[in-house]
Image: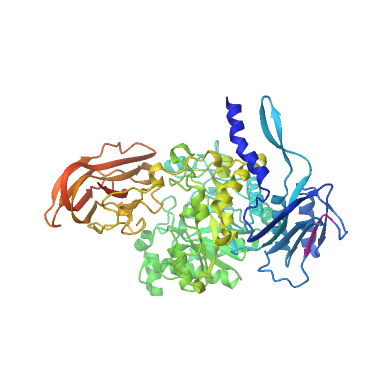
Amino acid sequence: MKRILALFALWPLWLWAQESSIQIIPQPQHLEQGNGRYTLHNATFSLRLDGSEAHELADYISTSPLQLKRSRSEKADVRIFLDETGKNFESDEAYSLKADTTGIEISARHEAGLFYGFQTLLQLSRQPITLERVGCVLFPKEEGDFEVPYVNIDDAPRFKWRGMHMDVSRHFFSPRQIKKQLRMMARYKLNRFHWHLTDDSGWRLELKSYPQLTQTTAYRPVAHYMDWSEQGRRFCNKDTKGASGGCYTRAEVRDIIDYARRLHITVVPEIEMPGHSWEVLATFPELACSGKGYENSELCIGNDKTFTFVEKVLSEVMEIFPSEYIHIGGDEADRSHWAKCSKCQARMQREGLSDVRELQSYFTRRVEDFLARHGRKMVGWDEIIEGGLSPRATVMSWRGEEGGITAARTGHDAIMTPWVCYLDNAQDFPIYEPRGIGGYLPIRRCYDYDPVPAALTEQEARHILGVQANLWAEFIPTEAHQEYMYYPRLCAIAETAWTKPQAKNYERFRAKALGEVEWLKRQGYYPFELKYEYGDRVEAQHPIAHKAIGRPITYVTPVSPKYPGSGDNTLVDGLRGGFTYQDGRWQGFESKDFDVTIDLGSVEDISHVEAEFIQRLDQWIWMPREVIVYGSEDGQNFTELGRQQNDVDPQIPGFQFRHYGWTGQARARYVRYVALQNGHPGGWIFTDEIVVQ
């Protein structure tokens, strides 16, 4: 029976493969398809390019699956050359590709464009698919010469920064695994590898200046990050029994940088500061405000030794990494330590700083000045805006789009990487997915995202350098799990990064992604099985009709600015929330009761009032302790209609959804809905819609 089911699962894929030959990710800006195919049989290629770049590109082409042999003939099957006719390519990464009865031509003004043109050729080249019988079941099988459909392609990237992030601090991934993902980055025309090398959970970069960092904090006695975090967050020696972790030698790092360079990928290192430095303070406790390690994660900004350390580290980082940009983190610092530190307070007084936000800005400015003196640019998470943005800083906007908008409006460059780019969220029904950070991020949400906020003017929008996919590794201990989270959502973000909105189409992309998943599996990757996607909650897929839709709503307790949903109409827009409280349909209330009143416009007969809540224990989201519903005809005198107490165990793991409300008979113009705080300090209440029937 399983074999028969496999046949039915693969049959649509086979039909898709037979019917469509243009399956390129990311979608080219301009593509015309002709009738016919060019067959690559014992095929040759010519390359008109000089210097070391010619040797590297020729070597890459010769070792590709197409098995092309280099020729000096102008009649080679594949002719690759720099355009000398003055064609107006949009950028160094732009290219043209033509395939017809005479063969295939790839042209560009720069070697980068030729490389990307060849990536497109690799995806265009397909072997004929036949059906192979295995037992009593037929399966698709590729065999024979490669065939290329007749096409005319003119292509160029939408954004300069097309990034992929990898966290190797929380769980260490080998150089071999990194190179494996770099190869896929090249396939999808991504060009920035953001390497998160240091964090609280481990320092992974070998340094001559401070060898103690990897000697002391590259290993821990507990393999899984979450277990380690719950058991005291202590490090151990490499030779300790059961030690888990690792670090990259300078030679390994340089090898990865060179490997990436040949794939036209720039490696951007991230060295976290001044927060997320638990591992630094475990090694050098004198750099902590308290002078003690294993207490907090923030470097002491009032200590001159901190800047000596930072500058020596960054000097060596710049010696190893040729990247124009150096990422310094800057996120989630607990500034309360600086407020209590005599050295930090003295620094603030000397520098005329009014608060600890300005103290962090002072730190960031000093780091930026140091990098600028060495010809480098600083990029940091959007917290670097707080307290005053450094003059030349580039902002990586992760807490929504506001950081990027603020940066662009003040003339600073920005890279957009909000929640819809966080691939550590579950990509399907979270209950059945491997454990992730807690949200739900299906591939369509990644694909539909536009990195240029509508709030920006055309001039301001020029400061949006691009977009980046992030993958944090708190819950991702294995290589297979890492790839499962990357693919195929990375394909969606790659198309968003490369393809202009008018050339995008989700249904076409999904068909391509289904085939790409099968291709990835054949190459030894472990992608999510998109063809079995469950999808979002049924309740979220269709609007609900009720009396309160579009009616004025008054908040006695304001919604948290962190989770405002889509605004004040979120609870009366007829749209139910999905599997994640971050989808713009849920509103969040932190450590407070939820209390709102809806004006129905006239006195109405009502029989049912309810709201839905979500519980996610590991995200500090609980059901309300009790819900109370009131009705009023004048908006002044309210009568209690009913109340309902929570019946969901506050310790139950996973996702829980529950409706609470009242059913009966009453007349009211005003409906007041109160949900009492759950009693957990710092706990959240989330709801998506108040339904009045």
Q: Quadrant of the N terminus?
A: top right
Q: From this viewpoint, is residue 196 visible?
A: no
Residue at image x 43%, y 58%?
399
In front: 411, or 343? Answer: 411
Measured as percent of width and height from the top left, residue 679 is found at 25, 45
Q: Is residue 631 left or right of residue 420?
A: left
Magenta region, main secondary structure: strand
Measured as percent of width and height from the top left, residue 608 is found at 23, 44
Q: From this viewpoint, is residue 34 visible?
A: yes
Residue at image x 34%, y 59%?
567
Residue at image x 58%, y 57%?
163
Seen in the picture, residue 659 relative to 633 is either above or below; the reply is: above
Q: Which residues are magenta?
A: 76-81
Seen in the picture, residue 227 relative to 111 is either above or below; the reply is: above
Measured as percent of width and height from the top left, residue 110 is found at 72, 66
Q: Farthest residue toward the left? A: 637
Q: Is residue 536 left or right of residue 494?
A: left
In front: 562, or 87? Answer: 87
Measured as percent of width and height from the top left, residue 428 is found at 48, 42
Q: Is residue 360 left or right of residue 685?
A: right
Magenta-span inclusion, residue 588:
no
